[in-house]
Image: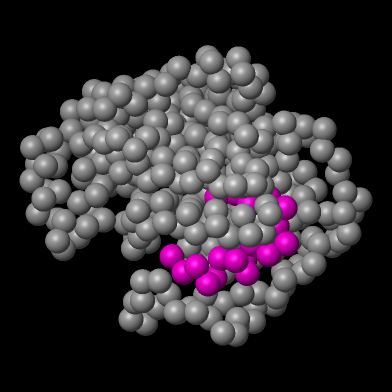
Amino acid sequence: MADVGHPPRWGVARHAGRGDLRGRARRRPRAGAGMPLLPRAGRRRPRHRRRRHPPPGRAVITVVGGTGRLGRLVAAQLMDLGNEVRIVARHAGDLPAGAEFVAADMRDASTIAPALRGSATVISAINGLDPAGGQSPAEVDRDGNLRLIAAARDTGAHVVLMSIIGARTDSPIEIARMKAVAEQALRDAHGLEWTIVRAALFAELWRDLLRQTAGRSGRPIVFGRGENPINVVSVADVAQAVARAAVDPSLRGRVIDVGGPRNVTMNELAAWATGSAKPRHVSRGMLRVGAVAATPVRPAIARLMRQALAMDTADLTFDPSFAHTEYPWLASRDIVGSPG
């Protein structure tokens, strides 16, 4: 498939001048911070930077989770289109030049409403899969999104929810179950305009993970047999769809599935990521035992082991032809078919 470069302009008028977007607001402590929903010893309360009021006629698009792999790309594309962008996350990280930043924690409802104030559109690009983040899909993808939806409803903002293909309450994959709950809550929110973007697995995420497991040996670790076909998509293609959903009113009330052009096995992903045709395998039996043993002491690791088991057996294929018929502007580069 042809590679897609810069996103199309989608008929959105650019605003005269970008100078008003340059420079970031100074950081100031937020007074009267509420107690966190799940208190942790030594956890610092989020602080908010002073807000800049957007110029007359210019609406703010808020990207929650805007410092992550997907959120950074979405924010950059929206700013290229001349939009006023606010990034909301726990920590600032590497921000696009000119983006406003507000610190908030989706586990603490008292930090969310102030972060969304003045937003015309709110994009939820959050996820609780990263074990290093100390969070779970239940805390972030379900409960965090429920708090975000409630705050957006009070603000009157249009919500773009990032979900995953196959999100349903009976899925064997925990994050898919949590996303399904958030999707239903968004649909049921009275008077709230919404768009849902579902994506396949991010190819770049699994490329990086497999490279990390390869280490000096050059042989990546594959959980299970690695023979189950899985659809993967370039995160850049997903970012383009999310950015368009934020600015195109015709996409409100729609569910957009974004997948890659073909299904691949984890063994094929490992070969693409590292060039090694002989990955090391962790058997399904070891994953089952490890998940049980790790649950009381390392629940995040146990969660990943259970997900790995599901990914090695569940139907995670996707045919993008219907989505491309419905939305012919969707990008679909064959990233696994190109050099990793």
Q: Is residue 299 left or right of residue 275?
A: left
Residue 312 or residue 2, whichever sits in front: 312
Which residue is rendered at x = 20% and y = 51% of the image?
302
Residue 81 or residue 195, whichever sits in front: 195
Residue 61 % position (x, y): 70, 52
* Figure quadrant of the C terminus: top left
* Figure quadrant of the N terminus: top right
Vertical position of residue 72 compared to residue 45: above or below? above
Q: Is residue 222 magenta?
A: no
Residue 309 % position (x, y): 20, 36
- Residue found farthest to the front: 190
Residue 312: image quadrant is top left
Can residue 330 be seen? yes
Vertical position of residue 187 compared to residue 230: above or below? below
Which residue is rendered at x = 66% and y = 36% of the image?
252
Residue 268 % position (x, y): 32, 25
Q: Is residue 135 left or right of residue 15?
A: left
Residue 197 % position (x, y): 55, 36
Which residue is rendered at x = 47% and y = 41% of the image?
184
| Segment colored magenta | 107-124
Q: Is residue 118 magenta?
A: yes
